[in-house]
Image (spheres, grey):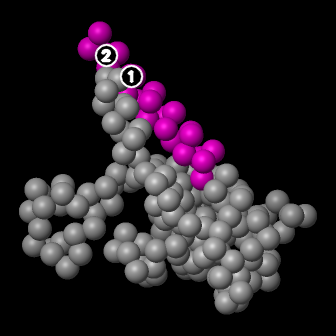
Amino acid sequence: AIGLVPSVGRLMRQQALDEAVRTATAYADSGLRNRVTAAEWRKEDFKPVSEKLLDVNLKPDQTLLAIRLWGKSGRVLFDTDAASPIAPKNAFPDTERLYKAISEGRPSAALVTEVTAGEDLPRADDAQLADTALTVLNVYVPVFADPDSDLPYGAAEIVLDYAPTQAATADAV
């Protein structure tokens, strides 16, 4: 019975990651389709009209916490919450997962703990960091801007709330 608890927990986490990939892919497909041209993706420079369309169509909600669009160079091209400490414009991607989305055309999900302590971070103790930590489902999804091509033009980083899944997992094990 002792070995069963960790196995159930791992299985539930893997199911959460698999579901996160499906959810993130649906958000990316519905929110990005025909919003940014292939030329804008290639130049890594979105026109104001495209940014406006993205602002309207990529709205965070209770499940969707943030979306960042990454160019092939690893530069943030769009961010739903650029003012947030979680999602700064000068953010660094998870290069391995970004590469997988852009070069291999495959989504990649991970559980990530993000700390939002702000300017107190260097002096924060463990208790303060725990109060500002948020575990999220972080998914990189390839973006296909040209319907006639199977080559990704960039990647969407979709950040989903993990709290409901975490609570269900804790209750189950």
Residue 159 visible: no
Give the residues in magenta.
1-24
User: In the rendered structure, which amino acid carries the disc numbered 1?
Assistant: Ser
Is residue 111 covered in magenta? Answer: no
- Residue at which label 2 appears: 3
Residue that extends furthest to the top in the rendered view of this protein: 1
Q: From the viewer's perspective, is residue 142 above or below residue 4?
A: below
User: In the rendered structure, which amino acid carries the disc numbered 2?
Assistant: Gly
Q: Residue at x 30, y 31 (%)?
A: 170
Tell me the distance, in whole angstroms, between the alpha carbons under discs 1 and 2: 7 Å
Residue 168: where, in percent of width, then height? 37, 32
Q: Residue at x 72, y 58 (%)?
A: 29
Tell which of 64 and 133 is nearer to you: 64
Q: Quadrant of residue 115?
A: bottom left
Res 105 label: none
Q: Residue at x 56, y 67 (%)?
A: 59
- Residue at which label 1 appears: 7
Q: Residues within 10 Å of mark 2 (few under 14, many from 20)?
A: few
Secondary element under disc 2, as helix, strand or loop, is: loop
Q: Residue at x 36, y 31 (%)?
A: 169
